Image (cartoon, rainbow, N blue to C red):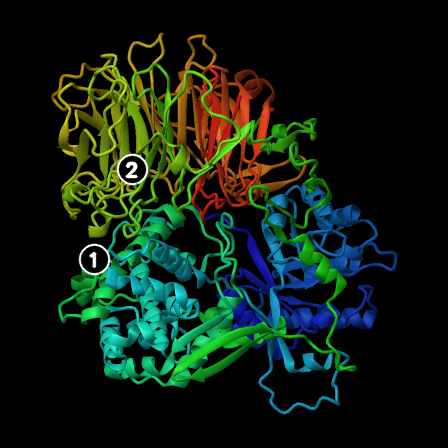
Amino acid sequence: MSKKIPTFEVCVDSVQSAINAESGGASRVELCDNLMEGGTTPSSGMINTILERVKIPVMVMIRPRGGDFCYSEDEIKVMCLDIRHAKSLGVHGVVFGILYPDGSVDVDRVSKLVDLAKPMKVTFHRAFDMTNDPFKALEDIISIGGIQRILTSGHDSSVLEGLDTIVQLVKQANSRITIMPGGGIRESNIERILFAVGLEEMHVSASTAICSVMEHKISTIHMSRAHHNSEYMINVVMVYGCGMSVHNEVTKRAMYTFRPIIPEYNKYAEYLHNYPGFVQAGSFFPDWGYGCMGNEDNSEEAHWLPFMKTSVEYIREKYNTATWEQDNVAQEVISFFFAVISHGVADITWHSIEMKSGFIRAMAYLNFMNSYAAAHEVADTGGEFTLAHMTNLDYLIDAWSLPIDDLVEIYQRLNRTVEGNQIEICVKKAFAAAQMNKSPFLIEMFEAYHKGGLNNMAADVTDCWHELARWFEFGPNDNDELCNTFRMVAEKRKERENKFHTHDDVTNFLYNYSEELLEITGYRIRYHKKNGIGTFEIHRHLLTDPITNEPELQDAASSENEKNVKVEEYGFDQIFQDVLTKDEQISLSDENNVSINLPWTNSDLFSPSSYSYSSNISTDAACHLIPNDPNKVLTINIPYSYAHFGHDMVVGDFNGDGIQDLAISAPFYSHLPEIPQVGAIFIINGRKSRSFKFPLKSSNILDIADKIIYAYNSRDENNNEAQSRFGWSMSVVDLNKDGIDDLAVSAPSFGANKYIYSGKVYVYFGRKKEGLKTDAADLEIHSKQNVSEYDWQIEALGQYMSAGDVDGDGFADLLIGCPYCGMYSEEKEASVFAFLSSSDHKGNITVYDYDWSIISPGDHEYEWFGYSINYYKSESMQNPIIIVGAPGYHGHSIIPMAGRIYGFEIVDKIDGSGKSPVKKIFDLSGVEEFQGFGSSIIAGDFLDNGESFIFVASNSETHKKKFPKFGNFWQAGAIRLINMRSLKEDKKLSDDDMNLGRGLLALLRGSESASRLGSSLLWDKNEKSFWVSEPFTYWESGQIFKYSMESLIQSLVSEVCLVGREHQAKFGNKMIKFDFNGDGKEDLVVNSEHSSYAARLSGSITIILE
């Protein structure tokens, strides 16, 4: 998701640096000369040229020399002349500072220079850090007037070291002047500084050295005191982000599920696994010419089917198909082109080609005011900030290989002239750039979104690979569009040209200098070509001392820093380390009772107000890692990569024995190797007595489950589609009115391989003793309609489901949320469909057979109405209420994705006419950008006193932290406990009666940026307590909290805080209570759907026994 970022001022000392800073997104530049001296006044020619080349504001350094800041009268005269000249040139502002010999601010002379500079803006530079008292200096500078900001490192060697002082300065300044931190800000610490302090502006250099074009070098003559090698280096600013590894990630996931049905095609899967260097190069290749030597059109050609058809025909001619299994070169080339097609397929859905609700288009509407171009740029480059590392990319290797000669010939057959050395040069630069980017950030929706998400792209690739294998075996036909992805866009693409990429100056700069940048950091790329195959390899090389010519020893401080940022992995016991300030240190005790002294307490973490923080909050709270005791904690996993085991969990008595059973979903699992993302449901029956012996003999759910349900049926053409994501959402109902719980399961991506994505819901009836059937559902709810531009559009039916006795007959009815649906030609307006329990239910019905529906009362697209649903009726209520969340809501305002909840009362008798019996009785809207209010909902009489309350999460809400430090916690999430008596129509969270102590009873805040507090909410009715999760905290290790109603309202201090043991596992995405061991006590079951313990991102559940 997007977010508001501060103004970035970038320090530059050359024309190229200024251009790169602007292209990379800098808001302003500070121009100076002689950075090695701390910066001095630049020349008139430099100022003039940069003003001509960039449009962003330019602040010019006014400093007559290096050294201290106590100047003579002659030096002051020079500064005055330079200020007048800068003003005459039209610069935005100037930067200077003058001190008395005693280290105080020279108020008199600074005042004169400020007056001379008007109306230009003025920054008081880091002379401030050399003052004898920073807090008195602050007041002196403010008293002068006309100075807009102070540049400071917090009176210390770097911003990180001076962070506490900067916090105090910001507080003392109280918006009278801007405090702009600068000095030692790096990519590794910028986010911590930004969110710890909550600043409006930041000063960075972002510079790196590149090789000069000078070829004639004399090593014995030096023009400066610098290291002689650096005389042939040029420092330039580089602000850049890229995501080349995304395509390799898609290919890797597709490889996992590519299992051809036809035995003769299995060899292609083997080729893909055997030649990773060719596969990784091929995954990138279609982008090879963008921004390089004028090859944009040639690069664009490589994305489309004519290129692939010609490639297959050429390979079949050149390499004998009968000898492929003995010809390693042929296998290498084939694996390369399988990866090329992976890139092309993924780009279609990723870039929303001919898809109105594809990933980038949806992101554009939700986060970029419907600007596809803005969303496209952020999506392609990754942006400066992201949620968290999703997974490691250790599989990326240090060598790429390409069939250079073959590629040249293929282009010739397409009537394009491409020289082999052009491909070599351009790919070499891209390879260098890829090697510098092995840790990209991926966001949550990028993986899960049904149109263009990572898993969706991988499944589309797998689909195309099956057809591609047939092409290699028998050759392509003239009218063959290979697979559904290309068939979908083939006709419309003839009408208009679709292009995937444009590259700006910064991207071109990185390509041009990527190899040199690698050399500076101690790496060298080697290239060799044999039999038409070009191979790039990266090697570490030792730098040599200029005098002794011996290898340089690694700097001790640098080595220590590498240790401090190292990620240590140890299976289930994984913990990450980072460079932390003193009050952020994580202390570990013994393995079975690990305590973490947090930099915030639960009471600080969950503030009592949006705007004020208590000053006497304790800082001694502790969280604990999950106990590593197999007699107390059980972990169940699945040995299948990307399965997302535990994505949803529900409990119900499916066999009528009076004991609750547990259903666990894995929507990306497949029991058929050749069919991806089929999905499965695993049933664990409840026990009357302790029947499990601990520790368990196996942690594999395939061994533990009492039943496994698969919707996929190869004999039933209505249920044999790949990537349906069966198990995405589940709900316990009694739809056949027999008194035994039934299980409703959604497959919202059903129809994905036809690009319909209509979705489907399966209902399995519970049976006395027998339980749920596993071979076929008793009832199927589907939509046969193709998505069109003018009709009622059903998309991703069952994205969320809930249940409740909405008609009052004593049996649980089914509520199906369709947040991506569109009604009456309005895209993404969304709806909730109600299916009432009836003894007549069986066989197949359509979604249009609903008993009644609730269409979103909102007035815009992408509201996501139905993203969360909660049925509620207390004994004191006459009619039940259905509460629906729409976290994408922004209405007529210009606040994107603020979110809203709606309350509907069932006021009319349900008569089967299809008329909705509901009446909207309240709505409550978020008021902040990307707040996402309504992402999760629980309602109930939590105090058993007849009062109704609602617990609502905004899991992407940003909040300001004021104690013990100032700062913004971006998309940390929040949870509100609200008295439902205060809810009416057209309410906003900013209304007075939504303040604490009135309608709002408690407000919980996320503990760190992008931690996603409120991703899962659980009310334990037996213990009268809430469980809330924060799955993205601690580098996605995740943590959960337990609150009693008393602690929630009175102290905001959690009773329990548990932290997941596995790095990147997202502990806490889903929670539920279930008596696993049959001792009569409900145990806490928590999922970690990104756990990689059994297989890469396979998922697991943790059972904490009571």
Which residue is rendered at x = 69% and y = 81% of the image?
229
The 10 Å Cα crowd at callout 2, few under 14, some 14 to 19, many 20 or more, is: many
Which is nearer the eye, 612 or 309?
309
Amino acid type of the residue tagged 2 in the rendering: Pro
> Where is mark 2, residue-wise?
819
Q: Give SS at disc 1.
A: helix
Question: Label 1: which residue?
Answer: 484
Q: Residue 252: x percent and y percent?
A: 39, 58
Q: Nearer the viewer, residue 307 or 983?
A: 307
Snapshot quadrant of residue 233: bottom right
**What's the distance in space between the residues labelled 2 and 1, CA to CA?**
25 Å
Taking depth in this image into account, of 901 and 335 the one nearest to the observer is 335
Q: Earlier in the sequence, mark 2 or mark 1?
A: 1
Check disc 2 and report its element: helix, strand or loop: loop
Q: Position of residue 485 (x, y in %)?
A: 23, 58
Residue 282 position in % (x across, y down): 37, 69
Res 857 visible = no
